[in-house]
Image: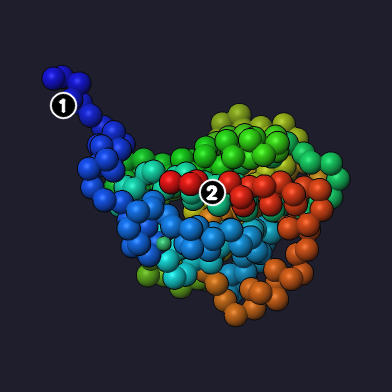
Amino acid sequence: MGQAVRVGGSAWSALADLVLPRTCAGCGLPGHLLCRRCAALLARPHLATPRRFPEGFPPTVAAGAYDGPVRPAVLAFKERGRAELAHPLGTALALAVAAVASAVPGPPAEVLLVPVPSSAAALRTRGRDHVRELAGRAVGELRAAGLPASQRRLLRRHGRVRDSAELSAGQRRANLAGTFALTPGADAGGALLVLVDDVVTSGATLTEAASVLAALARPGGAPVLGAVVAATPRESSRTRSAAFPKASAGPSGDRADRLSGRWPRD
Ligand SMILES: [Zn+2]
């Protein structure tokens, strides 16, 4: 009896899946956690190009556009507690990481996924760190595809940040300045650094995080890179992705191809 009383959120949602009909978190189609059509929208790695492209924005690949059915799918995972979406969304993140890492010349380096830390307030509200969940899933997918990858918390937040929802891009940057710091004893060990987050919109958060993380990048090596599940689209994004051929071609591009074929069958 005692055990039943202590059933946690994820156990409860697993039980709910057994009794309640499942619907696609993107389009509402019955039967799938994320239907094939919606999953395919997250298998389109491209360079993220925020509208105002902040100076210092790290080269960032998004697995899909933050638009259409992708938005409710990400929000269901992030805000509505559908933690089981970590599987398909983490796979999408892995695809983005593989694509951005494959653009770095030379033999594949060890990739360190660095989750963008959520604010303390957001962590309290959600009761979980959804970006770390995504990063953990992505690491598993990358390793399964033969890419040496791990996750490390190298950034922490400090200071007080206003809720950025109603701020302009410029205000967001000012709001974020000084938000991130390296964790005590942070060390990247010469690995390729890839900042990971769920979504990129204005690019201010990734820019600020990358500027702090840059202190750990190998001198003379690749800069800090970024990978996200989805990016707010803009008109010229197709042109930009055309100028990024290595993301989907070449020996390491094969890994990205393999990853894109690893969608769950449920
Ligand atoms: Zn769907």
Name the residue furthest top.
2
Residue 219, picture quadrant? top right
Closer to the camera in the image, 218 or 7: 7
Q: Residue at x 32, y 58 (%)?
A: 30
Name the residue furthest bottom.
235
Identify residue for label 1: 5
Q: Amino acid at mark 1?
A: Val
Closer to the camera in the image, 200 or 56: 200
In the image, taking residue 163 as reference, residue 258 lies left or right, namely right
The residue tagged with tag 1: helix, strand or loop? helix
Q: Measure the C-alpha gap from mark 1 to mark 2.
A: 34 Å
Q: Is residue 266 above or below residue 62?
A: above
Residue 35, image x, y percentages: 43, 57
Residue 229, image x, y percentages: 53, 55
Q: Amino acid at mark 2?
A: Trp
Closer to the camera in the image, 257 or 55: 257
In the image, taking residue 133 as reference, residue 183 lies left or right, namely right
Q: Residue at x 70, y 68 (%)?
A: 241
Among numbered discs 1 and 2, the one appearing first in the sequence:
1
In the image, taking residue 38 as reference, residue 10 lies left or right, namely left
Q: Residue at x 86, y 45 (%)?
A: 106
As drawn, the label of residue 263 is 2
Asked if the residue under mark 2 is in contact with the one under mark 1, i.e. CB atoms within 8 Å, the reply is no
Where does the N terminus fall, quadrant-wise? top left
Residue 227, image x, y percentages: 61, 53
Q: Quadrant of ligand 1?
A: bottom left
Residue 140, picture quadrant? top right
Residue 26, picture quadrant? bottom left
